[in-house]
Image (spheres, helix red, strand yellow):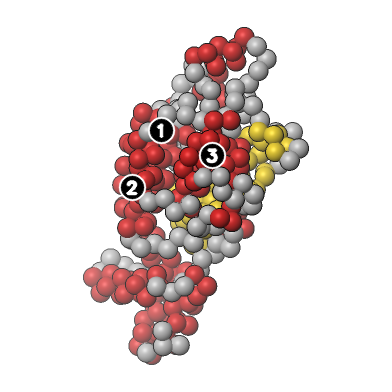
């Protein structure tokens, strides 16, 4: 017992290295850690950023985290991260989420088609995302937040006040719809006397939302675009460019609040390129695989007090 506690102390002061004995010890500690109930270790929050079609890389990240046994206790998301997050929090398997990605199209949750775009330019009427509620309900049912299998939160912005609106109670589908509602193109979602648009404008990486659910350790999957290389050829791309730039500026503070960041290389995928959604998933898998051991080490180090207490109690 004393020997194990001494090793734990040495790890907290010197960290792990790539030598085999340390890897063995790391894996041993990992196995001890992940069997602890969430109230006896730091509660883990998974945070999923915005990013349109790039955001399906979150599915790949979830696949690797689950395969490796990384505990995920609460989930928070913005925009596409809210869609993936709500489906995952409802208990969907990775296989089911991959099927969802295969069928994903940009117009599934909106009336954005040739006629809709023509109307946008000819009349003073923004497009609707009402179909998004039906799309979300088709995957999770008409559920309240408290009915999901994992605690979940998402964010939107009040277009009139600029306030960040946090959703973690009430009906899930309208909240997710509001979180991905691109301003300037789609009608604001009216909700409790507010006019709500895409949460990526105010909270691209909603770390604080996860912490509001009790997360003590946050791992964030971030799918920012490379807006410096984006061609600005139409209204839609211009609007998304504004959100990407705003999101990148805001994400600096959120990144500092997260304990670990997985950042799939998806910057070259435009937010509307849903035909590349499965490619996004695979890039999420690759990025998470490459960083998974470091994520484990990070979580182990943050959990040392919990592990020491468990060993002292003979658990």
Which residue is rendered at x = 62% and y = 9% of the image? 122
Cα distance between the residues tagged 2 and 3: 22 Å
Q: Nearer the viewer, mark 2 or mark 3?
A: 2
309 relative position to 4: left or right: right
Q: Position of residue 164 (x, y in %)?
A: 67, 44
Q: Quadrant for the N terminus, please.
A: bottom left
Q: Looking at this view, is 40 or 111 the one in front?
A: 111
Q: Position of residue 215 (x, y in %)?
A: 55, 62
Q: Position of residue 243 (x, y in %)?
A: 57, 32
Question: Of callouts 3 and 1, which one flags the residue occurring earlier in the amino acid sequence?
Answer: 3
Counting every numbered tag in the picture gives 3
Q: Residues within 10 Å of mark 2 (few under 14, many from 20)?
A: few
Q: Which residue is mark 1?
A: 104
**Is residue 251 something one can see in this rendering?**
no
Q: Residue furthest bottom?
A: 2
Q: Are marks 1 and 2 in contact (CB under 8 Å)?
A: no
Report the disc number at residue 95. Answer: 2
Label 1 SS: loop
Report the disc number at residue 282. Answer: none
Report the disc number at residue 79. Answer: 3
Q: Looking at this view, is 287 or 6 the one in front?
A: 287
Label 3 SS: loop
Q: Quadrant for the C terminus, please.
A: bottom left
Label 2 SS: helix
């Amino acid at each position: 017992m004393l020997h194990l506690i001494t090793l734990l102390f040495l790890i907290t002061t010197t960290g792990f290295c790539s030598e085999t004995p340390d890897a063995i010890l790391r894996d041993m500690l990992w196995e001890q850690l992940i069997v602890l109930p969430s109230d006896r270790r730091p509660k883990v929050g998974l945070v999923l950023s915005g990013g349109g079609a790039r955001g399906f890389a979150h599915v790949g990240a979830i696949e690797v985290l689950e395969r490796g046994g990384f505990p995920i206790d609460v989930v928070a998301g913005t925009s596409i991260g809210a869609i993936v997050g709500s489906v995952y929090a409802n208990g969907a398997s990775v296989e089911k989420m991959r099927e969802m990605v295969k069928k994903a199209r940009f117009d599934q949750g909106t009336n954005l088609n040739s006629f809709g775009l023509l109307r946008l330019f000819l009349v003073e009427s923004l497009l609707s995302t009402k179909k998004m509620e039906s799309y979300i309900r088709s995957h999770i049912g008409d559920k309240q937040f408290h009915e999901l299998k994992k605690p979940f939160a998402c964010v939107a912005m009040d277009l009139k006040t600029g306030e960040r609106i946090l959703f973690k109670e009430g009906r899930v589908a309208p909240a997710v719809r509001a979180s991905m509602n691109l301003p300037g193109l789609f009608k604001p979602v009216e909700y409790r006397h507010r006019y709500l648009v895409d949460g990526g404008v105010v909270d691209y990486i909603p770390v604080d939302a996860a912490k509001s659910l009790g997360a003590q350790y946050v791992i964030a999957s971030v799918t920012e675009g490379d807006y410096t290389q984006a061609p600005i050829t139409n209204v839609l791309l211009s609007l998304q460019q504004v959100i990407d730039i705003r999101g990148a500026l805001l994400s600096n503070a959120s990144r500092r609040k997260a304990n670990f960041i997985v950042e799939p290389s998806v910057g070259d995928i435009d937010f509307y390129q849903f035909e590349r959604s499965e490619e996004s998933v695979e890039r999420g898998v690759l990025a998470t695989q490459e960083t998974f051991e470091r994520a484990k080490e990070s979580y182990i180090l943050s959990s040392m007090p919990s592990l020491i207490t468990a060993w002292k109690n003979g658990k």
